[in-house]
Image (spheres, helix red, strand yellow):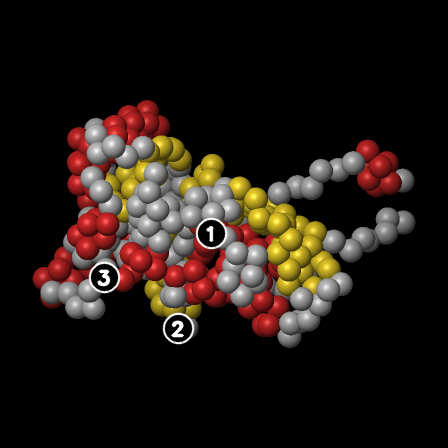
Amino acid sequence: MKKCERIESVTVHAPATVANVGSAFDAIGFAVHNLGDTVTASLSEANLIQIRSIEGDTNQLSKDTKKNTASVATHALLCALGMETQGITLDIHKGLPIGSGLGSSSASAAAAVVAVNELLGKPFSRHQLVPFAMEGERIACGTAHADNVAPAILGGFTLIRNTEPLEIIELPSPTDIFVSIVVPNIELRTSDARKVLRDTISLRSATHQWANVAGLVAGLYQGDLNLIGRSIEDVIIEPQRSKLIPGFYDVQQAALQRGALGCSISGAGPSLFALSDSNQRAHDIGQAMTTAWSNHRIKAEYMVSQINTDGATLVPSPVSAEQTTTAAL
């Protein structure tokens, strides 16, 4: 009879995300492939949360469990279960650059809560894990927003209709849409990008923005790529944050001239994203955008992806020859 063994550790990869998606500030985000953070959560007898290691882009990251998004999110999950003294050790591998606008802080938090949830027998659904990851975002930028952590956990396009109480709607993710993401070699923290935002907007701008958000959602449901592209136009946040990104309008224009359906700031920036209808066009757009930034003496790199509908995924542990033999018995 096969003996059930207690799971001692779980590794999870959470993807990079594009938040805001132009017009939908703090409301819509989507996940992409290739980039992300990986967290291994292990049971421990220490009766507390510990961060054992941080690898990858570790610039300015803290092992202080009250300051790291992965450990803060883990603590929120344990508190909800009444397991504050459960020992958890976290090993974090940063695959995302900090301050890039690709959901670096949310990827770590998302990977951590999914890993710990698996480790403890999955007491929560994926949707129920989002509020815990949001607490990690609160530490990172002062606001517990969900437009990064929701797609990082759930995958695809997600709409945050409300935060109190939290209501997440999973939107259709067209398979024929391609994303060019261009990351310049500059850092812009979300907390700093939020400081430039005004508290008031004109009724005319608000009406325009509401129509664009509605058009974006309608475009996703209809699979209308042109409507999606037109609807990411941001007349409120982009004009304020673009001032923090050198060469922004030249880079955006370069994308549109090469056939982008639309182009805007990814999250808080400084990365930009552009949507297109083919893989080749997406590469052409990415190259044009990096060239435009080089004209401003800013080095940039680009990547191309379709929409990642998987979200946070378990990373299989290597199986040793001894384990294979034991399992066969």
Residue at 41% of width from left, 73% of height from top? 165
Determine the secondary structure under disc 1. loop
Q: CA distance from mark 3 to mark 1?
A: 25 Å
Please tell me in which quadrant of the rendered image residue 296 appears. top left
Mark nearer the N terminus (3 vs 1)? 1
Residue at 51% of width from left, 47% of height from top? 58
Residue 203 higher or lower than 252, as above or below: below
Residue 278: which numbered mark, if any?
A: none
Q: Position of residue 53 (x, y in %)?
A: 62, 50
Mark nearer the N terminus (1 vs 2)? 1
Mark nearer the N terminus (3 vs 2)? 2
Residue 124 higher or lower than 267, as above or below: below
Q: CA distance from mark 1 to mark 2?
A: 31 Å
- Would residue 273 be seen by someone viewing this image from the given angle? yes
Residue at 36% of width from left, 32% of height from top? 301
Kindly identify the amino acid type of the residue bearing the numbered disc 1: Gln
Residue 255 higher or lower than 156, as above or below: above
Is the residue marked by circle 3 packed among few (<14), some (14-19), or many (20+) residues within 10 Å?
some
Please tell me in which quadrant of the rendered image residue 252 appears. top left
Q: CA distance from mark 3 to mark 2?
A: 22 Å
* Number of the front mark, 1 or 2: 1
Q: Depth check: 268 or 294 in front? A: 294
The residue labelled by disc 2 is 164
Q: In the rendered view, does 237 fall on the left or right side of 60?
A: left
Kindly identify the amino acid type of the residue bearing the numbered disc 3: Leu
The residue labelled by disc 1 is 60
Determine the secondary structure under disc 3. loop
The residue labelled by disc 3 is 197
Q: Position of residue 167 (x, y in %)?
A: 41, 66
